[in-house]
């Protein structure tokens, strides 16, 4: 079945450090890919998405590029802030299915 | 505008009791989803409703779980004869369907003692 594999952490970084969270997927067909974020005490919210190969999603300084050849959607940010401390989930939706398939999530803590 | 709301926010119940969890989606959204977030299993899809179509129940873990959506709006997730392994945060989301963004509610934390 369809699945998402991502770095699980937890990861602790210093402010202004570079962040990469790896995400790879297994799916038949051409899924849409998402990064969701869950800030402490808040609900899940969409961070960015890409719906086809080579698309780049970006938001709040985060970027991820849909790489069909490596079935990956790695999340990057050049300079993290304390406010980026959260749990990050990679997910996919396959066309015609609508249900999100999530990775296990990765907890990020950014220290000042 | 109002987001997805869920009630109750916390529920503690004894093993063997039935529980009902409620979700109010964003007005106008045609699709409604239930997910479960637990330490051992991460985020799992349970069920989704899209318009008047038959719901996709493929994620329900057992026949003790059921859900309905009345009038294309509010949804109730019912767990009968609760077990300790049902303890989790139950999340509801709604969207306009397809691959469009799913908006999540704050969740109901269920604890089965």
Image (cartoon, coloured by chain):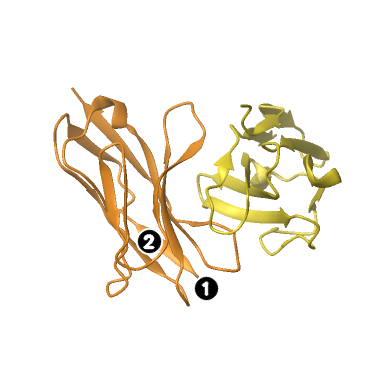
Chain colours: A orange, B yellow
Percent coordinates x, y for residue B11 in the rendering: 71, 29
Question: Is residue B68 visible to us here?
Answer: yes
Q: Nearer the viewer, residue B11 or B49?
A: B49
Tag 1 residue: A1
From the viewer's perspective, tell me whether residue A48 is left or right of residue A95.
left
If the image is split into quadrants, where does the N terminus of chain B sit? top right
* Image: B68 above or below A51: above
Q: Nearer the viewer, residue B36 or B68?
A: B68
What is the count of numbered marks?
Answer: 2
Q: Which mark is residue A72?
A: none
Question: Is residue B80 visible to us here?
Answer: no
Res. B104 image quadrant: top right
Identify which residue is drawn at 72% across, 35% down.
B24
Tag 2 residue: A5
Packing grade of label 2 (10 A; few <14, some 14-19, many >=20) is some
Helix, strand or loop under label 2: strand
């Amino acid at each position: 079945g369809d699945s998402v594999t991502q770095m699980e952490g937890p990861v602790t970084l210093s402010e202004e450090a570079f962040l990469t969270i790896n995400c790879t997927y297994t799916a038949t067909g051409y899924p849409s890919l998402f990064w969701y974020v869950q800030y402490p005490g808040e609900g899940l919210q969409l961070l960015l998405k890409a719906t086809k190969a080579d698309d780049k999603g970006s938001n709040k300084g985060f970027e991820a590029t849909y790489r069909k050849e490596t079935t990956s959607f790695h999340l990057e940010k050049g300079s993290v802030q304390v406010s980026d401390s959260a749990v990050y989930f990679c997910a996919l939706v396959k066309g015609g299915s609508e249900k999100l398939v999530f990775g296990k999530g990765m907890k990020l803590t950014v220290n000042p | 505008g109002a987001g997805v709301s869920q009630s109750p926010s916390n529920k503690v119940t004894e093993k063997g009791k039935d529980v009902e969890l409620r979700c109010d989606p964003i007005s106008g959204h045609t699709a409604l989803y239930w997910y479960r977030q637990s330490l051992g299993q991460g985020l799992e899809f349970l069920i989704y409703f899209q318009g008047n179509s038959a719901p996709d129940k493929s994620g329900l873990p057992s026949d003790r779980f059921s859900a309905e959506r009345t009038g294309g709006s509010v949804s109730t997730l019912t767990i009968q004869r609760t077990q300790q392994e049902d303890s989790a945060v139950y999340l509801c989301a709604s969207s306009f369907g397809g691959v469009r963004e799913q908006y999540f509610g704050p969740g109901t934390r269920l604890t089965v003692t």
